[in-house]
Image (tube, rainbow, N blue to C red):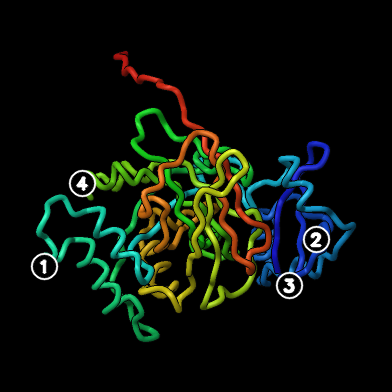
Amino acid sequence: MLVSQLVENGETLVAARERGGEEAKLVEGANSVLDLAHEAIREGVGLRALIERKGFGRTVDLAAGYREGRLLSPVAHPDPAHLHLTGTGLTHLGSAATRDAMHKKLEGEAETLTDSMKMFRMGLEGGKPAEGTIGVQPEWFYKGNGTMAVAPGAALVSPAFAADAGEEPEIAGIYLIGEDGTPWRLGFALSNEFSDHVTERVNYLWLAHSKLRNASFGPELLVGDLPADIRGTSRISREGAVIWEKPFLSGEANMSHAIANLEHHHFKYEVFRRPGDLHVHMFGTATLSFADGVKARDGDVFEIEAAEFGLPLRNPLTLAGDRPVKVRAL
């Protein structure tokens, strides 16, 4: 099932459809996906089961809503400080080569195993542990809270101090923390883990700086299991013409880490199990336009699509003006 949120006449509505189905219908009595998730936890039922029990109303045109700027992120929190954007890297087969090339600073290092390659090898050897055991922890990073989340169709804003503004086509897990501190997975969504790859390339210790950027996810939430083999497309358009396009692979068949392992190493920290918090945790990618020498410009449009997730995730790029920050003493 694919679930989405949209606005009509100032009111937030929830719509759902089957994967591959053309028609989306409003979920009766649903004001938000967050409210539905809370209700499902309280009643001990799955999100899909709850939606089916509530029933469906009239049909809505999601594509038209998208064109009109009425589609929202598939889940949001009324207090954005309680939504966390995080992610993991070096989790996908093939991603190490891209990252390793970015991190090499000197010629003649071909025989040197960089920190990136060490981390990737650790994932290959221990990222998919036997059931009931804990695997190696992945690279992890923080992107910000809900104020950094951008709705599908809205602009990803690159700050003036950024050296690059590049897309990362990823799958994200969406989670709500229950009242007893249990993380509940609502489902999965496409995400653009927007990053500054030039800054990261200077020194891998600047990874944290490079990740503090906007991110977008959706527009539809896949409720149910994540397919093991996901094949999508990432592209950039400029003035209406595609300037770069490449397939991307995701799902556990194309990853060095199991999803459960990535989830464990995120939620093992008590700070990420605060009741009522939402988490959007991005699982990584092996495909970047930056690796092909592409430099995005103001007004370019990023588009990420995979058939399992319904509508594509589309966001234009905006380069922000300079806004110097001055700290004042009280």
Q: Position of residue 233 (x, y in %)?
A: 55, 62
Q: Residue furthest right?
A: 58
Q: How crowded is the residue under tag 3: few (<14 C-alpha within 10 Å), some, or many (20+)?
A: few
Residue identifier under label 1: 111
Q: What residue does disc 3 label?
A: 49
Q: Position of residue 206 (x, y in %)?
A: 25, 44
| Residue at mark 3 to residue at mark 4: CA–CA distance | 48 Å
- CA–CA distance in space, label 2 to label 4: 46 Å
Please tell me in which quadrant of the rendered image residue 159 appears.
top left
Residue name at image x 20 percent, y 46 percent: 203
Q: Which residue is mark 4?
A: 203
Label 2 CA crowd tier, 10 Å (few <14, some 14–19, many 20+): many
Badge nearest the viewer, 3 or 4:
4
Which mark's residue is nearer the viewer, 3 or 2? 2
Q: Which mark is residue 24?
A: 2
Closer to the chain start, of discs 3 and 4, is 3
Question: Between marks 3 and 2, how big is the CA–CA gap?
Answer: 17 Å
Q: Is residue 75 visible?
A: yes
